[in-house]
Image (tube, coloured by chain):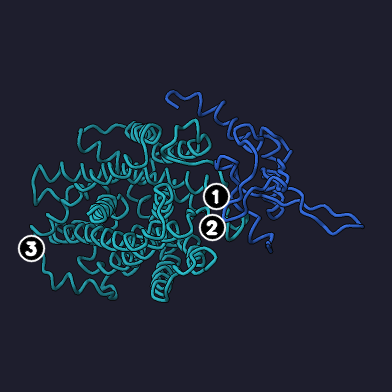
Amino acid sequence: MKKILEITLGIVTSIGGFLEVGSLATAAQAGAAFGFQLIWAILLGTICLIFLVEMSGRLAAVSKQTLAGAMRDRFGYPFFLVPLVTMSLLGVLVLASELGGLSLALQLVTGVAFPWWAPLGAFAAWLLLWKGTFSVIEKGASLLGLITVVFVVAAFRLHPDWARAAAGSFPSMPRHEPMRYWFIAVSIMGASIAPYLLYFYSAGAVEDRWNETDVPVNRITATFGMSFGGALSVAVLIVAALVFVPRGIRIERFDQIALMLTPIMGRWGFVLFAGALGIACFGAMLEIALSVAYLTAQGFGWQWSEDARPRDVARFSLVYTITLVAGALIVVIGVDPLAITLMSMALTSALLPIAIVPFLILMNDRHFVGQHGNGWISNTVVCAIVGLAFVLAVVSIPLELLGS
Amino acid sequence: MEIALVRDLLDKQLVDREGELLGRIDGIVMSYSADAPPQITHFELGAQTLARRLPSPFRRVLAWLAHRFSPRGSQPYRIEVSRIIHLGRTIKIDIDGTRSAARETERWVRDHIIGRIPGS
């Protein structure tokens, strides 16, 4: 009985925490520009994420090590600096995207375009990290995040042509705007396969003292939680396709996306969208700031814990504080939030091998995971999808930059 | 017991006698004299030791930063290997971490930055 409750809670947590500004914006863009044709990118990204999340939980349960700690341990300090620096910088960039989304949500709800929404949002996130505990942050953000299920409701209300949606689940060549098509596909995969999630997940597993008996539970929660989460992204894409394509709307600004639920649910649709966006972004900000702090503190062997008082984990607290300030600065400078979101998601795809290749090596090293090492299926699937995302990113990012 | 220096010691997590995290082994010090076999004497921790492990342009920048900003300046902190209590995935050392110089930077950050923010 307790196990069932644990599994349910784990799945609910993953669903509520799945959507964030990256998956929302990329799925909406894809739907508006290419109808159902890019559903396959969400599916591939989600499958890869299922395997990776399961792996990071398994690593923590078997080796009692966090992903960051194990990387330093296995590959040594000079190599460790490469993922540390790239993933921290990427984290700040993605955090800025989330903060942009949160600011927009606050602006939509209040009707006030206020340049200080971003610093205020960053401060609120910092306060929660400063005062809150890990389970309050993880469970609270995810339970509130269940509001994002509104997109599934909206998708069903529109009675989509499921046969066409199923056809979009298989990769196909673009019929128009090939550069845009591949760039959005890359951004979608980058948004799904978020490396920061892996550091966050493994730190949580170590903090909760998982052991070998948690391996099966971890497998079930990762599989179902991430699958349902991916379904939310697909729902966003379907709604965007059915709302924007017939009206001939091309999404060039963030606030256009905000209208996607209005034709279905009226005034309530607008409020629900703003609520879902705000909560999803806020939750992601907490996770990203913590992930950067986990990565740094665990890599250098400092004391770390989200449950301890900040003064007892001073350097750890300093890192998440700096990360939030840096993210807020980018937003205050006034970069276009939609552009920075799409670009940071595509960049994630391009940088994925830096985070994932060492991780795969760890998961095949008996010294770390003993008999719980990866099978050939997980190795092949992760290599293939990460490889595809990387190749597409390296080709399409320069073209996108040249085009715009 | 056979120990591989890089696999089993370098970059491993150190904990103090209470099990609290101390830092990681950034460097290993050996002593050598003509009439005895070489012997490992100390573990080293600190930004200067970390700087020495990088390729040269990075090494100089980090060494300068450490010299300029680290409360310990250019001195790495050394722990005698005789203080090892347990060797495993993490390495337990017989010292009191709350007073140890291994946590000097942590204390500095606490006293000068984090501790000054309300609610810490």
Circle 1: element type: helix
Left or right: A276 in relation to B65: left
Residue B120 location in percent, x, y? 45, 27
- The answer to whether residue A394 is seen in the rendering is yes
Task: Identify the chain of the residue marked 3, using the numbered disc in the image.
Answer: A
Residue at image point 24% right, 67% down: A39
As drawn, the chain in blue is B
Say if mark 3 contacts mark 2, CB within 8 Å: no
Whole-angstrom CA distance, mark 3 to mark 2, is 47 Å
- Residue A159: which numbered mark, if any? 3
In the displayed structure, A311 sits above or below A73; it is above
Task: Identify the chain of the residue marked 1, using the numbered disc in the image.
Answer: A
Left or right: A362 in relation to A328: right
Whole-angstrom CA distance, mark 1 to mark 2, is 8 Å
Whole-angstrom CA distance, mark 1 to mark 3, is 49 Å
Left or right: A154 in relation to B40: left
Residue type at numbered disc 1: Gly
Left or right: A272 in relation to A30: left
- Residue A299: which numbered mark, if any? 1
Residue type at numbered disc 2: Met
Question: Which residue position is annotated with label 2?
Answer: A71
Residue at image point 26% right, 42% down: A279
The colour one sees for chain A in the rendered image is cyan
Residue A389 location in percent, x, y? 40, 67
Say if mark 1 contacts mark 2, CB within 8 Å: yes
Residue type at numbered disc 3: His
